[in-house]
Structure formats: structure tokens, C-alpha cells
């Protein structure tokens, strides 16, 4: 992915935008003793990295929210939030965060594990009997842990959505079962537990699991368990076409060369894999609380979340969260992509906090590298 294979998240962006050895993403030059220097991160360097995205990268606009734990967050913009009017991103802006939704959903599932209501190594068919029994896919062989870690082998459903055409599906409503039906007409990618492959289908199932266990929509559980307790005033789980809060317009380039404004569309196609909206300050607060405290997860469940699997790339994947080794500390976070938006956010073990928001669905390795550079500069500021 990273070439718009995905509607609402890109696995290659997860590998590239957070870990690629771009111009500033690689380790700095070694000194006489062979020591590695972390890339620079002054406000000027962050601004230059953002300007590269909006000039060389061709993205309409971008915003970085960043800072370490010893000081306030800073907010920098480049480009425009609205091509028609030339208005910049609001400071701070809300945006569709795509697959960063997965971290919120995984957190709720792990809370249910901590409450004794779900077992990580119990098969998903135990909780959702008969849901996955098609084309060789078998929920009796897939555990909850494998779903959260993308080790289930479940096929991806988003290619079918994209094949329908963006403009045709834009206002079409999908139920979780609709999305499962699209996925399960394909055979498994591999036998459960034998490999790793990013699939949004895993989190459609995770959302259905939350609803089955709690009797409530997964989005309401996220609101009551995470958004409200943390006071994330700019974070929401929308159900319609609109983006809550002050936001830029979102854009996408179609295969015929047209760039269209796709700010509004029916987000049901993303469901628990990528439905949510948030802002930079809310995202860094969420990741900081999740990774550096036990306010959201008990120690055993946080340890489970941070127990990672190799992905075949330079990142590792825990239960709904990405781990990347950086010169400036261990990074924990996620990326997200959805029609009109690309985002990345997270924290480091050395106190770095950053989120970068783009009002475009980026598609090239060059753009991925530019996002990586901006994240590097921001999070080590």
C-alpha cells in the first residue's frame, strides 16, 4: 500500500512513513567513536520538512503538533487547508485519522481482557460463532490475539471497495457484515499464526467482538472508556458524512488525473478499522497516556500490547500498535490513511511526542519519505 491500495489505511505507509531511511529518517553521521547522532528537530527544521511535503510532495496542506514532555506542544502549518479559499489548517485541526482508530479499538479489547470478559488466546468463533466460515477462512482457528496483531491470515476487503470506484461508494452505507462478506469471498492469505499480513478485516471483527461482549457499539465503548476519561475534546467516532470540529478540506487524486474534494463521505466503509477523527494534541495525549501510564491498561495487558511480531519490514507490530527503533528512542504509535487524509502520530521512550496531519491521500514512496522526515524532525524536537 502507500500507492492507494487502501481506502483507509496503508500498510506500506506503516512501514515507510514511520521507519523508512529517508534523508533525515536514517541515523545521523557517526562520529569518531562511531556514536549515532539523532536527526535534528528545531522548529525551523520541522517547518522545512512540512514545506517539502507541500511543495515537492504536492500535498495541499500539512500540520505538525509536537513537543517533549518538559514543554508545551507547538503547532506548525504549511500549505493550505482549503484549495478554493486558500485558508490554512485551523490550529489545531481535526482530521480523519484512519487506522490510528485501530489503537483505540485494541485498547478497548485489552480492557475487556483485563476485566476477564475476553481471552486473548481463545478462538474468535467462541465469541462470534459462525462469522468466519467461508472460502477456507475459519474463525475456529483464529485467536483474538492473532486478530489484533494481523496474524490471522484473513484477506483484505478494501480492494473490493476501491474497485467499485471512489465516487460510486462515497455515499454508500456499509454494515460490518457487508465488509465481512467482501472479505470472505477470498481464501486466507496464510494459515492463522504462521505469518504477518496487514488486513483491515481483522479490526472489523474486533469491533464486532466488542459489540458482542458489551452489548454496545464499539464506538460508544471507545467514547466511554477512552475519549471521555482522557478529556479528548477533539476526538470523535462519527457516524455520518461530516468531520466534527474545525478541520481543513480533504483531497484525493483520481486515476483519471482529477483532484477532488472528498471531505465528506460515508465513513461506515472504514468502521472499526479506520472510522475515527482526532487532532494532533489529542493523539499525542492518547499515546502518551497509553504507553507511559497504566490509566488505560493494566500492566499485564499493556505488556501484551507491546509484545511485538516481526512484519518483514523494519517495524514490529504489537496488538494494534507499531514499534520502531529510532536514534532518538523507541517509537510507539501508528499511521492512518483514509479518503482525503494521511496521518501519523506517536511517542518515544525519551519523551518525544508528535503528530503529523496531511489533507491528502498520499500515494508515492517519495511522499512517504517526506512524511517520515517530518515525523522524525517533530518527534525529536
Image (spheres, rainbow, N blue to C red):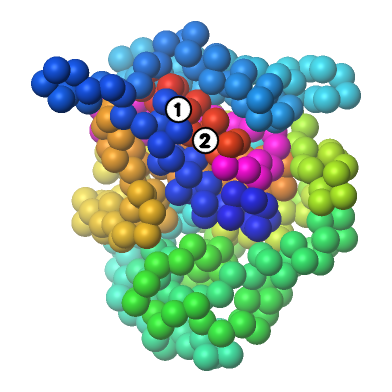
Q: CA distance from mark 1 to mark 2?
A: 8 Å
User: Can you name the residue that lies furthest to the front here?
Assistant: 32
Observer able to see residue 142: no
Query: What residue did someone put label 2 on?
Result: 369
For the magenta stretch, what is the residue range?
346-365
User: Can you name the residue that lies furthest to the left here?
Assistant: 33
The structure residue drawn at horizontal position 52% and vertical position 91%, both measured from the top left corner, is: 136
Give the quarter of the image for residue 191: bottom left
User: Can you name the residue that lies furthest to the top here?
Assistant: 44
The structure residue drawn at horizontal position 71% and vertical position 61%, both measured from the top left corner, is: 269
The structure residue drawn at horizontal position 43% and vertical position 40%, both measured from the top left corner, is: 20
**Foreground pick, 30 / 212:** 30
Image location (x, y in percent) of residue 229: 44, 39
**Foreground pick, 104 / 327:** 327
- Looking at the image, is 239 positioned above or below residue 160? above
Q: Are the residues at dot 1 and dot 2 in contact (C-beta closer than 8 Å)?
A: yes
Where disc 2 sits, the SS reads: helix
- Looking at the image, is 289 positioned above or below residue 316? above
Q: Is residue 59 left or right of residue 121?
A: right
Query: What residue did someone put label 1 on?
Result: 23
- Looking at the image, is 98 positioned above or below residue 30? below
Amino acid at each position: 500500500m502507500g500507492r492507494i491500495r487502501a481506502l483507509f489505511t496503508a500498510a506500506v505507509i506503516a512501514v515507510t512513513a514511520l521507519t523508512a531511511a529517508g534523508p533525515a529518517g536514517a541515523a545521523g553521521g557517526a562520529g569518531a567513536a562511531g556514536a549515532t547522532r539523532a536527526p535534528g528537530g528545531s522548529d525551523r527544521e520541522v517547518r522545512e520538512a512540512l514545506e517539502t511535503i507541500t511543495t515537492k510532495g504536492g500535498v495541499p496542506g500539512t500540520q505538525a503538533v509536537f513537543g517533549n514532555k518538559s514543554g508545551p506542544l507547538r503547532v506548525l502549518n504549511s500549505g493550505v487547508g482549503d484549495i478554493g479559499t486558500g485558508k490554512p489548517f485551523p490550529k489545531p485541526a481535526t482530521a480523519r485519522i484512519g487506522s490510528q482508530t485501530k489503537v483505540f479499538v485494541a485498547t478497548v479489547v485489552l480492557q475487556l481482557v483485563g476485566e476477564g470478559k475476553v481471552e486473548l488466546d481463545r478462538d474468535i468463533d467462541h465469541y462470534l460463532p459462525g462469522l468466519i466460515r467461508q472460502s477456507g477462512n475459519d474463525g475456529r482457528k483464529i485467536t483474538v490475539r492473532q486478530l489484533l496483531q494481523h496474524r490471522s491470515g484473513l484477506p483484505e476487503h478494501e480492494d473490493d471497495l476501491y474497485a467499485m470506484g471512489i465516487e460510486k461508494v462515497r455515499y454508500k452505507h456499509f454494515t460490518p457484515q457487508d465488509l465481512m462478506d467482501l472479505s470472505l469471498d477470498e481464501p486466507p492469505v496464510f494459515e492463522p499464526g504462521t505469518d504477518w499480513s496487514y488486513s483491515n478485516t481483522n479490526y472489523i471483527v474486533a469491533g464486532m467482538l466488542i459489540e458482542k461482549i458489551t452489548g454496545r457499539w464499539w464506538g460508544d465503548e471507545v467514547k466511554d472508556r477512552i475519549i471521555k476519561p482522557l478529556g479528548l475534546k477533539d476526538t470523535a467516532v462519527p457516524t455520518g458524512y461530516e468531520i466534527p470540529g474545525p478541520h481543513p478540506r480533504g483531497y484525493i487524486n483520481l486515476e483519471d488525473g482529477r483532484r477532488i474534494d472528498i471531505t465528506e463521505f460515508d465513513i461506515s466503509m472504514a468502521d472499526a478499522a479506520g472510522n475515527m477523527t482526532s487532532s494532533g494534541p489529542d493523539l499525542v495525549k492518547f499515546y502518551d497516556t497509553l504507553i507511559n501510564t497504566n490509566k488505560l491498561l493494566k500492566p499485564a495487558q499493556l505488556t501484551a500490547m507491546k509484545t511485538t511480531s516481526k512484519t518483514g519490514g523494519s517495524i514490529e507490530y504489537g496488538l494494534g500498535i507499531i514499534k520502531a527503533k529510532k536514534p532518538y528512542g523507541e517509537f510507539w504509535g501508528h499511521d492512518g490513511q483514509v479518503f482525503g487524509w494521511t496521518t501519523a502520530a506517536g511517542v518515544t521512550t525519551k519523551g518525544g511526542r508528535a503528530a503529523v496531519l496531511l489533507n491528502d491521500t498520499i500515494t508515492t514512496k517519495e511522499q512517504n519519505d517526506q512524511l517520515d522526515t517530518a515525523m522524525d524532525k517533530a518527534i525529536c524536537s
